[in-house]
Amino acid sequence: MDKAQAILPAQAPDQQTPGTNQISAYIAHIGERVRGLRARRGMTRKDLSKHSGISERYLAQVEGGEANISITLLWRIAQAMNVEFHELLPYNSKPAIQVAPLLAFLERLSPEQQKSAYSLLLKHFADAKGPVHGVALIGLRGAGKTTLGSLLAKEMSIPFLRLGEIIEKFAGMGVGEIFSLGGQQAYRRLEHQAVQHVIDNYDNVILEAGGSLVSEKETYDLLLTSFYTVWVRAQPEEHMSRVIAQGDFRPMAGNQEAMEDLRRILTEREPYYQAANYVLDTSGRSVEDCLQELVTKVRRYCCPWQWS
């Protein structure tokens, strides 16, 4: 059996064997899924190659829809990204939701209404750990999470914590080393433990979360049900310029490619970032202006705490 056909969805006996064009389209869709999930989790192709044992060149062919990939190699890619195997397959290969009226109802809603419906369902069915423990800021590096988070914490007279620093303390090494030695699986386990640690040990806190946390469902659900979440967003060009202004010149290497990767990451993560309670756009705005908006929103909607 052709390797590509081995991962095609099962067909009814009366259906024809898929033609070359159908197979090629299916393989291309798998490549898009691999590329998208890699972007969502913030992995470079080099990192995926290291932890899957598959060459970067071949991974590029997979993502470009040019590789006749086997189930074995696809499974290794899924393990390296710490995702379920079916997540790499096109959407129509996944089991359908059994409640058809629910899907039909959601499709009739506007994007904003769908977001509200999601929040209501999450609050009703998720395993919430208790009351809101503070404000969690999510979003890509360069959006302003650290600056605004520290200022908000000072305004509220409560601690400001960076989840990455807690993870490093748990591991006894830097984030880069964690990924290098243990890959996605080790980092995501520590990330979940770090969020739970904050919930267990702090009543009121401003928490800066990592940008890729939203790709881990259980951890993100825990964050959403335990904090008032704010997506701090910016335009791709501002993300890039702010990171460079911080002294990190790595994005300058292959600038056009770096911008394309950044846009892809934002595109892949946006539906997840949109689940936040509030979206704060910092593009073209001063720190003072953004802070005032954030303070006003937090005071009005989420925090019964005493303000200084």
Image (spheres, grey):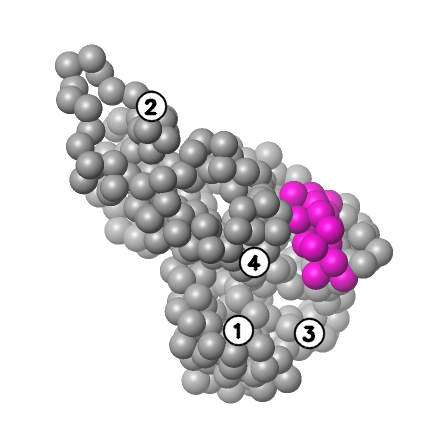
Kindly identify the amino acid type of the residue bearing the numbered disc 1: Ala
Foreground disc of the pair 2, 3? 2
Reply above or below: 89 against 134: above
Which disc number belongs to residue 150? 3
Kindly identify the amino acid type of the residue bearing the numbered disc 2: Met
Going by the image, does 112 lie left or right of 34? left
Q: Residues within 10 Å of mark 4 (few under 14, many from 20)?
A: some
Q: Nearer the viewer, residue 164 or 61?
A: 61
Query: Which residue range is magenta in the image?
Result: 174-195
Q: Quadrant of the C terminus?
A: bottom right
Q: Residues within 10 Å of mark 1 (few under 14, many from 20)?
A: many
* SS label for mark 1: loop
- First in sequence, mark 2 or 4: give its number: 2
Q: Residue at x 49, y 32 (%)?
A: 72
Kindly identify the amino acid type of the residue bearing the numbered disc 4: Lys
Task: Please state the horizontal and vertical placement of residue 261, each as a whole percent of the image.
Answer: 44, 66
Q: Nearer the viewer, residue 73 or 276?
A: 73
Which disc number belongs to residue 46? 4
Kindly identify the amino acid type of the residue bearing the numbered disc 3: Ser
Q: Nearer the viewer, residue 237 or 293?
A: 237
Q: Nearer the viewer, residue 178 or 149?
A: 178
Tally of marks: 4
Reply above or below: 300 against 53: below
Reply above or below: 259 against 77: below
Reply above or below: 239 against 221: below
- First in sequence, mark 2 or 3: give its number: 2
Q: According to the image, label 2 marks what residue?
A: 1
Which disc number belongs to residue 143? 1
Task: Please state the horizontal and vertical placement of residue 176, each as a whole percent of the image.
Answer: 70, 61
Q: Residues within 10 Å of mark 2 (few under 14, many from 20)?
A: few
* SS label for mark 3: helix
- First in sequence, mark 1 or 3: give its number: 1
